[in-house]
């Protein structure tokens, strides 16, 4: 390694980082989401040198992102700097950088800044983004909800539509601006539609003089036969009833035919709309392309074995939304708890694997129950054999989500804001921009 | 008024807002800052029809904006929707719009959307922005701190510079990125420099592996002979000592000669810098140009009489930073408390003025004391005859600022976050973007 020798001869102060990037790190983790972060935390006390690479500087608690998009929480309430979370582990370093590929032979991750980083073991946990089923032009008109920027953009648009409607002198334009369509009847779509309805009906109700926010139209559109397809049917029916009770128009069996900046086509009819929020398909981030393997399914995931490694590449693991891991012949769903458990599993077994101590026991997913929230006093839980819905499910949902946040301060702040909102129907983060 | 008669014949639903804009409002207030908001609140129960126009949807508590820029608070903690604050007054309406001018003869405010709004009395409280003394090209490299966007941009830049330095392999580049210059030794500059120093020395101290944030250089540059020129000299000296104790390099008597995206020229020397924050000159927003009067001073303010009206235009009042109001022959300073008291005064006397009941008693400013905060346990207060500095002043500063926030929820959230920060040295809003 000539680079390293050169560095040894140079004055210490002039080349502080060159050797680190050329000397392989024991583990390089791409992605600071649930999977990558859980893995890094487990590895924190292992003594292995670990580098976590993420495009953004923060770990985002995505399950509550819809609350940022609907002005209930601030971005900082659900985002914690990755290097703060991992700061107490001296052998773990964090790099804010964009991965552009992997040099599998040389075992190096290529970064957008041009300086590759070498690894012994590679953990890819890059997550997923929204998929527009080939209609890439829809993305500009119908933002998905994956990042803080997405949430802020949707929040600004929602609030701005009411402002523009209030200032408009054209009733047709006012009606258009107060019509919002949410595409996708899964948990994200249900949560967004419920939160938008509550925002309009309760929070904004008395603040306007020329429009009546309680008459705002919110449509939830699902191509499949019912809402919450991943849940037992009674829970999907319950979600529909509760949403309709909030004034949401639920359209199932209705595929989207076209999306334009100010309109959507459903069932052959054009509907003028103020905003479309996309929560339908999901596509894995390009781990497969980085390492040069064929994606295992249409959503671009990488097939992994029982130890979450890529067949033929025991030194590369893929976790979370980007991985197609099967158990009992069925693929595991793209859920935060799957990602987190995979990260914890790999963080536990990796030290032995790095040391070369044979193989790891297979990963086993322990289903903690699946949940979705519709609104105030209304949520559903599916524990497999048991289901829960209503006020108690909602309380449980709130407690679980406060508990899952990283950091005591964030838990306290979110809990307080929820209590405040429960009693006042107000939302604290009504900022445009 | 043909428009109104046409409206009466048309179906009610088709022309809901046209008549309102053509019928003059009793009072139109431009600006939802301290002055405009205080005025609107006082007018809320007067029965007068009032319209408040602002470019943004929120009232911003600017005295704490530096805490957003330094990742201590979230934007929503110091921003409350104007229409939410005024929602309880049915005769007050809020319009989010951009004012482009005033048709003084026809008594109409021209808006960017093309539909003017008519008034009987006009209150202009558009505030001020930063002035670059003719160097408009400096603005892009050295953002001032006036809006949420400004604060978010500075926060991203500050945090991103540390991230880029950590990832950099070039020591000179690392040093540049970790050098920040604050221009202007007034309260804003002192507060920014102190907060930046605490961020680097305490909050970020242990989170990096290739750089040492505690060695970050922060320079506070002032063209005049000392810091806090508006305060008694001992308080300026105290601020300097405390800042130097935090590791800030204070350069007084040092005018800025040039600012580039990655450097600044001071005393003929070029210094490579990661960021420059501007807190020097202030310029009134263009109320003078809107109403076609000569600005009364170099910062573009409009001279107003004892009742804050514009000479020759008793129906137009100018308040806050955009007004040059004199008392005992001395112009009132551009402070939040001046703006707020002017708004309260005008809101109290306007109903009689609108009714045509003669003249109003003159405005009198009641000085509540001037304050600036340097950092943890360090603030200064100037009460005229008495001065305060140190830990007690800091505690008083914190209590006063929590109290001055709009809304109980924001007070609670800010107080909690400050308590948390006091004990942990952490900051909750370290989000890039």
Image (cartoon, coloured by chain):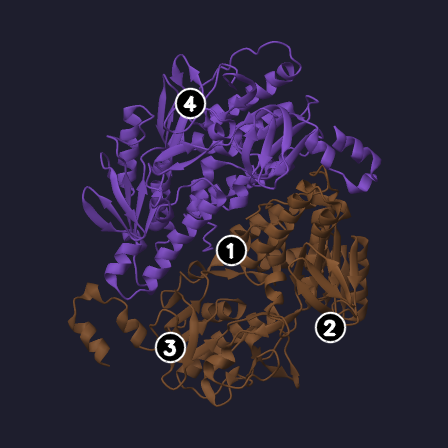
Chain colours: A brown, B purple
| SS assignment at label 3 | strand
- Residue B366 % position (x, y): 47, 17
In whole angstroms, how far apart are the C-alphas of marks 4 and 2? 64 Å
| Side (left or right) of B387 relative to A312 | left
| Side (left or right) of B126 relative to A6 | right
Up the image or down, B222 lies above or below A412; here it is above
In whole angstroms, how far apart are the C-alphas of marks 2 and 1? 30 Å
In whole angstroms, how far apart are the C-alphas of marks 1 and 4? 38 Å
Residue in the picture at 23% in, 76% down? A4
Query: Circle 3 sits on which residue?
Result: A26
| Side (left or right) of B285 relative to A251 | left
- Residue A365 % position (x, y): 61, 76
Label 3: how many Cα within 10 Å (few below 14, some 14–19, many 20+):
some
Toward the front, the furthest residue is B2
Whether pointer 3 and pointer 4 mark residues with C-beta atoms closer than 8 Å, the reply is no
Toward the top, the furthest residue is B358
Of callouts 3 and 1, the N-terminal one: 3
Q: Nearer the viewer, mark 4 or mark 2?
A: 4
Which numbered marker is on residue A407? 1
| Side (left or right) of B178 relative to A392 | left
Which quadrant: the N terminus of chain A?
bottom left
Label 2: how many Cα within 10 Å (few below 14, some 14–19, many 20+):
few
> Both on one chain, marks 3 and 1?
yes
Label 1: how many Cα within 10 Å (few below 14, some 14–19, many 20+):
some
Chain of the residue on which disc 2 is drawn: A
> Both on one chain, marks 2 and 1?
yes
Pick the front one: A326 or A426: A426
Residue in the picture at 50% in, 73% down? A125
Query: Circle 4 sits on which residue?
Result: B369
In whole angstroms, how far apart are the C-alphas of marks 3 and 2? 39 Å
Query: Circle 2 sits on which residue?
Result: A384
Chain of the residue on which disc 3 is drawn: A
């Amino acid at each position: 390694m000539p680079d390293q020798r050169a560095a040894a001869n140079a004055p210490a102060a002039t080349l502080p980082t060159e050797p680190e990037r050329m000397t392989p790190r024991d583990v390089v983790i791409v992605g600071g989401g649930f999977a990558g972060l859980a893995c890094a935390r487990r590895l924190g006390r292992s003594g292995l040198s670990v580098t976590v690479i993420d495009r953004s500087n923060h770990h985002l608690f995505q399950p509550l992102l819809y609350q940022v998009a609907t002005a209930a929480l601030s971005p900082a309430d659900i985002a914690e700097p990755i290097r703060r979370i991992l700061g107490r582990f001296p052998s773990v370093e964090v790099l804010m950088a964009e991965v552009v590929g992997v040099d599998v032979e040389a075992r190096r991750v290529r970064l957008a800044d041009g300086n590759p980083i070498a690894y012994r073991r590679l953990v890819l946990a890059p997550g997923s983004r929204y998929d527009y089923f080939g209609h890439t032009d829809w993305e500009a008109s119908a933002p998905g909800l994956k990042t803080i920027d997405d949430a802020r953009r949707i929040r600004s648009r929602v609030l701005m539509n009411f402002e523009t409607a209030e200032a408009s002198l054209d009733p047709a334009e006012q009606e258009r601006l107060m019509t919002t369509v949410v595409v996708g009847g899964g948990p994200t779509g249900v949560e967004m539609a419920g939160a938008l309805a509550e925002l309009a009906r309760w929070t904004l109700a008395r603040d306007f003089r020329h429009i009546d926010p309680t008459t705002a139209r919110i449509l939830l559109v699902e191509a499949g036969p019912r809402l919450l397809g991943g849940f037992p049917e009674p829970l999907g029916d319950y979600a529909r009833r509760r949403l309709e009770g909030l004034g949401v128009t639920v359209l199932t069996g209705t595929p989207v035919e076209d999306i334009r900046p100010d309109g959507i086509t459903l069932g052959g009819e054009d509907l003028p709309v103020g905003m479309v929020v996309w929560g339908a398909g999901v596509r894995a981030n390009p781990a497969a392309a980085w390492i040069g393997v064929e994606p295992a399914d249409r959503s671009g995931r990488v097939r992994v074995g029982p130890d979450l490694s890529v067949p033929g590449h025991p030194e590369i693991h893929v976790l979370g939304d980007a991985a197609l891991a099967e158990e009992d012949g069925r693929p595991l769903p793209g859920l935060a708890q799957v990602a987190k458990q995979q990260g914890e599993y790999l963080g536990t077994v990796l030290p032995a694997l790095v040391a070369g101590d044979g193989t790891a026991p297979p990963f086993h997913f322990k289903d903690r129950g699946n949940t979705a929230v519709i609104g105030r006093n209304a949520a559903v839980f599916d524990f497999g054999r048991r289901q829960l819905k209503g006020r108690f499910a909602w309380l449980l949902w709130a407690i679980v989500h406060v508990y899952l946040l990283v950091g005591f301060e964030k838990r306290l702040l979110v809990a307080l804001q929820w209590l405040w909102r429960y009693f006042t129907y107000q939302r604290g983060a009504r900022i445009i921009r």
